Amino acid sequence: DVSTVERAIKSGLAYVTEDRKQLGLVLINNVMHNNTLANHKGISKNFVIDEYTERKAANEYRQKLRIRTPSIYQDVVNLSGGNQQKVVLAKWLFANPDVLILDEPTRGIDVGAKYEIYSIVNDLVAAGKAVIFISSEMPELLGTCDRIYVMNEGAIVAEMPVAEASQENIMGAIMRSGEKV
C-alpha cells in the first residue's frame, strides 16, 4: 500500500519530482535539513532530532553526491540547479529506497551536473537498486536505461530492451499509439 508518502517510504519507494523547486525542496531551509527530510527516524532518538547524526548524514551525502556548497548550512535557494537536484536525490537516498522513481531528473541543469546524475544512477543500479527513469529526452533514455517503456495517456503502448530501442522505434511507437509529435 503506497497511498501516502509515509507508506511509500516504508515500502521502499521514493519519487524525485520533476519540479524540484516547488515540490522537491524547502528552498528557505539549508542543505542539511533538506537532506534528512524524508527520514527523520534515521536522525532521531525518542522523537528528538540528534543534531550530530543529522550533520554527519548531511556531510556524508554532500561528499558522496559531490554537492557543491560552502557549507551544509547553506540555504538550498542559493545553490545551482544541479546542486539543488543532488540535494533532492540525497533526501531520498537517505531514506534508503529499494525503488527510486526519477521524473525528469536532469531538467534545467548543466551538462556537468547531468553527467554526475547519470553516474549516481549507475551507482544505484550497481548497488542493486531499481531505478525508473522518466525523461522526455530520447538520447538520455537510450544512454541511461536498460529497458524503455513508451506511454500514452497513462497506458504503456510499447516496451523494448535498449538494444532494440532507437529514436525511430520509439517515435514509431508514439505515432502508432495516436500521439501526435
Image (cartoon, grey):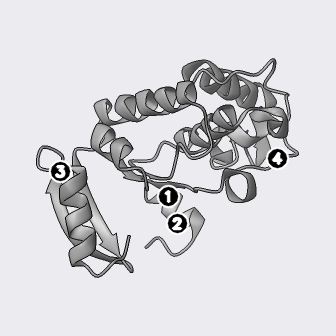
Q: Look at the numbered disc 4 and give the secondary structure of its residue.
A: loop
Rendered view: 42 above or below 17: above
**What is the three-letter code of the residue carrying label 4?**
Leu
Inspect this view and state whether residue 12 appears: yes
Pick whichever, 157 or 59, lies toward us: 157
Q: Look at the numbered disc 3 and give the secondary structure of its residue.
A: loop
Q: In this view, does 147 lie to the left or right of 42?
A: left
- Label 3 neighbour load within 10 Å: few <14, some 14-19, many 20+: some
Rendered view: 17 above or below 118: below
Give the residue pinned by disc 4: 27
**What is the three-letter code of the residue carrying label 1?**
Lys
Between disc 3 and disc 1, the foreground one is 3
Residue at point 42%, 27% (across, down) = 119
Give the residue pinned by disc 2: 7
Indicate which disc, 3 or 4, sits on the residue closer to the N terminus: 4
Q: In which quarter of the image is the C terminus?
A: bottom left
**Of the numbered discs in the image, which one, if any, rests on residue 10?**
1
Q: Look at the numbered disc 1 and give the secondary structure of its residue.
A: helix
